[in-house]
Amino acid sequence: MLIVRVFTAAARPALAGGTLLAAATGAWFAYDSFGGGPVTPFQQVQGHGQQLVVSEFGDDADTVVVVNPYDVTSRRTIATIEHAPGYGVFPSLAPDGKALAYTALPTDAPRPSPGSPAIAGVVDTDDHVTVLANDVDLLIAPVWSPDSSSVVVRKNTPAPDSAGSFELILLRRDGERSTITTWSTAAVFPIAFAPDGSKLYFAALNNAGTDLYSVAPDGSGETRIAHLSDEIARDWQLSPDGETLAYSVSETGEAPQVVAKTLELATGAASDAIASGDGTKMELNPQWSGDGRLTIASVKPEGGSSAVSVDATGATEAVASSGDGIDLPLGWSPRGDRLAVRSVEGAVPNEAGPSHVELVDRDGGRQRISENADVLIAGWLR
């Protein structure tokens, strides 16, 4: 069965969980040029410029692979994550590129489900695996601090006849654990740290809609920044300079649509990311490039889509186009010369079929990362 982690209405996630094993296999085994000791595959990929790190789903184990963005046939497996059958990990590469955090269900989880308690772990370049927690939410990938010393995860504790409470927990790599905030009136989702690490941004969703908050890592100074929508906001992405939040909003009504927006964090002022046009909007997956430009999937009502780059005025320029499918931006390479997209078969969302992660260059050339349809991007090595 093909499992696609794209549209919540058109796809279901593949989930997994378990133990992370070092994968020092055959061609990628090397020796330390200084001490003569073994060099791990994770160490081997350090210092070679921009490379894409992905996890590929397998029924009993996910594989973490480093891919050369200029020749995707050049690949190195750096780790394997065993898991309960039918589930997949949610990975996140540290900002310094020297560790991978993940959430996963253990292989011996009784009656595993998306709501089962998950492990939060970190593997470093020495193939040392540290399990930081065993009671967190699987579906929320860890959010790294800018200095790569800690991650934020979410823990939901259900209660009878309610969703229960939601905690955002700071897990330091030295083993220290602290709760940043706890909510029982809304579901909370960690978004990103400010570039200087002084605050964490998070979203709170309930029947009143979606609000944006900030809080210091020690739990102090929790502040409501803005009301993002009376309905559901999602796809939150903080700009590289930490000054603007991009997101998409589902709007119901006579003509339901999804609109991409930006919010100035200093003022709380929101605006449409793309200048108004004719017809119903379907704008998804906003992603920032390193130079601060925004790229958004613009799905056409008649079918097909373009990944469009947006300037400060809201004017757009197509950077990837699919006439018979949908391209969802997943992120730019550090150099800004490759755009990772989720290329979905089907001209409109309600016809969404199998999908694959592809890299698109500035000339429109494409490379498919994997024939496996269920691939998640963990991050980029620089």
Image (spheres, helix red, strand yellow):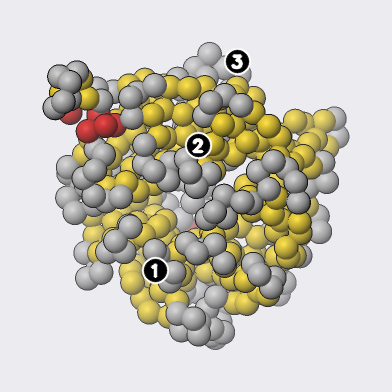
Secondary structure at numbered mark 1: loop
User: Hey, what amino acid is under mark 1?
Assistant: Asp
Which mark is in front, 1 or 3?
1
**Gap between marks 1 and 3, in whole Å?**
47 Å
Which of the two residues, 320 or 135, is positioned nearer the viewer here?
Answer: 135
**Gap between marks 2 and 3, in whole Å?**
32 Å
Residue beneath the point at 35% across and 48% down: 380
Task: Residue 362 in the image: state x and y as whole percent.
Answer: 25, 69
Compared to 200, does 237 lie above or below?
A: below
Mark sitting earlier along the chain (1/3): 3
Task: Residue 120 in the image: state x and y as whole percent.
Answer: 54, 28
Residue beneath the point at 80% across and 35% down: 164
Task: Residue 379 in the image: state x and y as whole percent.
Answer: 39, 46
Task: Residue 229 in the image: state x and y as whole percent.
Answer: 72, 65
Q: Residues within 10 Å of mark 3 (few under 14, many from 20)?
A: few
Q: Residue beneath label 1, please?
A: 291
Q: Residues within 10 Å of mark 1 (few under 14, many from 20)?
A: few
Which mark is in front, 1 or 2?
2
- Which circle marks residue 300 in the picture? none
Left or right? Give the position of 98 relative to 66.
Answer: right
The answer to whether residue 359 of the structure is visible from this angle is yes
Mark sitting earlier along the chain (1/2): 2
User: Hey, what amino acid is under mark 2?
Assistant: Ser
Which of the two residues, 205 or 149, is positioned nearer the viewer here?
Answer: 149
> Where's the N terminus, which quadrant?
top left
Q: Residue beneath label 2, please?
A: 149
Which mark is in front, 2 or 3?
2
Secondary structure at numbered mark 2: loop
Q: Residue beneath label 3, please?
A: 110
Splitting the image into 4 quarters, where does residue 218 fall? Answer: top right
Q: Residues within 10 Å of mark 2 (few under 14, many from 20)?
A: some
